Image: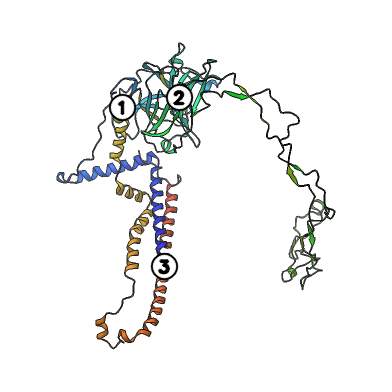
Amino acid sequence: MELKWLLYVTLLALGTLAVQAHDMDDDNDGDDVVDIEDDLDDGIDEVEESKPETSTPPPTPKVTYRPPVPTGEVYFAESFDKGTLDGWILSRAKKDDTDDEIAKYDGKWEVQDMKDTKLPGDKGLVLVTRAKHHAISSKLSKPFVFDTKPLIIQYEVNFQNGIECGGAYVKLLSKTPELNLDQFHDKTPYTIMFGPDKCGEDYKLHFIFRHKNPKTGKYEEKHAKRPDADLKTYFTDKKTHLYTLVLNPDNSFEILVDQTVVNSGNLLNDMSPPVNPPREIEDPNDQKPEDWDERPKIPDPDAVKPDDWDEDAPAKIADENAVKPEGWLDDEPEYVADPDAEKPEDWDEDMDGEWEAPQIANPKCETAPGCGTWQRPMIDNPNYKGKWKPPMIDNVNYQGIWKPRKIPNPDFFEDLEPFKMTPFSAVGLELWSMTSDIFFDNFIICTERAVADDWASDGWGLKKAADGAAEPGVVGQMMAAAEERPWLWVVYILTVALPVFLVVLFCCSGKKQPSAAEYKKTDAPQPDVMDEEKEEEKDKGDKEEEEEEEGNEEKLGSFIALMFIQITVLQEEETVNRSPRNRKPRKD
């Protein structure tokens, strides 16, 4: 049974190693993947040239790109497949309260194909530069007014180089007489801000709307609660992801990534700070009375210290029952001057003082129980009580923790329709990023879910299908991973060999019993006359089986240990080979 558990644990460990290797492959840089694909393409070309025409393999299925077309009414739709920035306005503004050197919105935007695209002709808007302020915007076909129809905003983002610190969120710019897209900047009023943002290890998916206070007319930002889902993959896998916000007239909202809900809630209940202030607030002028008693327990005023309570008794006392060990060297010091030490030649007694040899442990004390003056060891004092304190009792005057009284909130209001936000007339990207080449594509603003889904299917869906068609199968991925990490071959072999070894071990290692025919051919005692011998042979057989099983376990353990050592060595070699110092330069 122990052997079986050992095998099960080993198989589980091997599976974990394989999964970790697959995860490491997923985390590899995109440039490495491109190099491998280029090499494979070159190899395939050479093979195809050398093969006769009759043996040409069937071509790999390809996904043909067609620009998406809205299937219903939209307020804004942009796929960038024209290859230009027509309809988009670059900001020429400057940020306030910022040094002139970095205040300008001079970050570069271009319409480009996505790196490593599997859909030729599919273009998008790319934030090209890093460590600069970027701002670009475009007018809607008509302003969006919040009335009886939902709002759906959807677009795609690909962090082609990963992301260190920066955002990829979109702003829906409020319709105001002062709106000037040429001067779009961080303080330009917006109605909604939505999209991914990351700095350090803080991964966010913003949904913020600006709510107008009906009493004061001032705007306040309301933030949706953080999603429970793990967002890290969307920032690190270098794949195109589809971000969707659905806002309904009943104040409910949904946030989706790749058409999967990652956050949802209600504008009245799930925003911070809340849309509506509390009806009552604590009176800022209320003060705690001086005689207010907040102590739940107090010292007993009637308690008296016992007469036999000795506050001066020490916590530790000498053990009177201790006896000095025999052989204790009272006259020998614990440390003596090193007899082999010599005064340095450059020692100056006028400057350095009188030279003294360094102290070393007394050699005579090594064989003795101790040296120097013997002292009794200290033990806890059974009579020690410490400083006397009266016991604590319930406070009859306890009034609880004081809180100021509640008064009506003079700023209270109740807005039961926060969905009816400020209309917006433009969409904009106002971003700062420490990483370049952020890819945006297929923006759409509409009111019908089916229209947004059709647009996603014709855009993001095609990208997903093309990536899936280009990815190798499971066996291909395992072979590619083993080429990168040779130690995986050991894992694969063990994963296949161990079950076979298990079957052979448990099915073929039993003791063979003699048949009746064999008894007839020999002079061996017949079964009816060997009852006593059976018991002895059974005990002997059980012992032999236990010894055999122990031997098998020892052999298997040695074999597994040897394999894991081999895996460790290969992993260390791979780590060295993958270090920047040993990495071969990439060929263009």
Cα separation, mark 1 vs mark 3, equals 62 Å
Q: Nearer the viewer, residue 303 or 311?
A: 303
Task: Report helix, strand or loop for mark 2.
Answer: strand
Up/down of 216 relative to 21, above or below: above
Whether label 1 touches label 3, CB < 8 Å: no
Whether label 2 touches label 3, CB < 8 Å: no
Q: Residue at x 41, y 79 (%)?
A: 539
Residue, disc 2: 193
Cα separation, mark 2 vs mark 3, equals 63 Å
Q: Nearer the viewer, residue 195 or 368?
A: 195
The percent coordinates of residue 83 (x first, y second) are: 32, 23
Task: Report helix, strand or loop for mark 3.
Answer: helix
Three-letter code for the amino acid on which mark 1 is drawn = Ala
Q: Nearer the viewer, mark 2 or mark 1?
A: 1
Up/down of 572 relative to 140, above or below: below
Up/down of 417 relative to 230, above or below: above
Q: Residue at x 31, y 77 (%)?
A: 513
Whether label 2 touches label 1, CB < 8 Å: no
Number of residues whose C-alpha sits closer than 10 Å to that of mark 3, classed few (under 14), some (14–19) or many (20 or more): some
Can you tell which quarter of the image residue 397 is in? top right
Number of residues whose C-alpha sits closer than 10 Å to that of mark 2, classed few (under 14), some (14–19) or many (20 or more): many
Residue, disc 3: 553
Q: Nearer the viewer, mark 1 or mark 3?
A: 1
Could you say which disc has been placed on residue 37 in the image? none
The percent coordinates of residue 504 (x first, y second) are: 32, 67
The percent coordinates of residue 109 (x first, y second) are: 40, 24
**Residue 288 appears left or right of 193:** right
Three-letter code for the amino acid on which mark 3 is drawn = Glu
Query: Farthest residue in the bottom direction?
Result: 523
Three-letter code for the amino acid on which mark 2 is drawn = Met
Residue, disc 1: 450
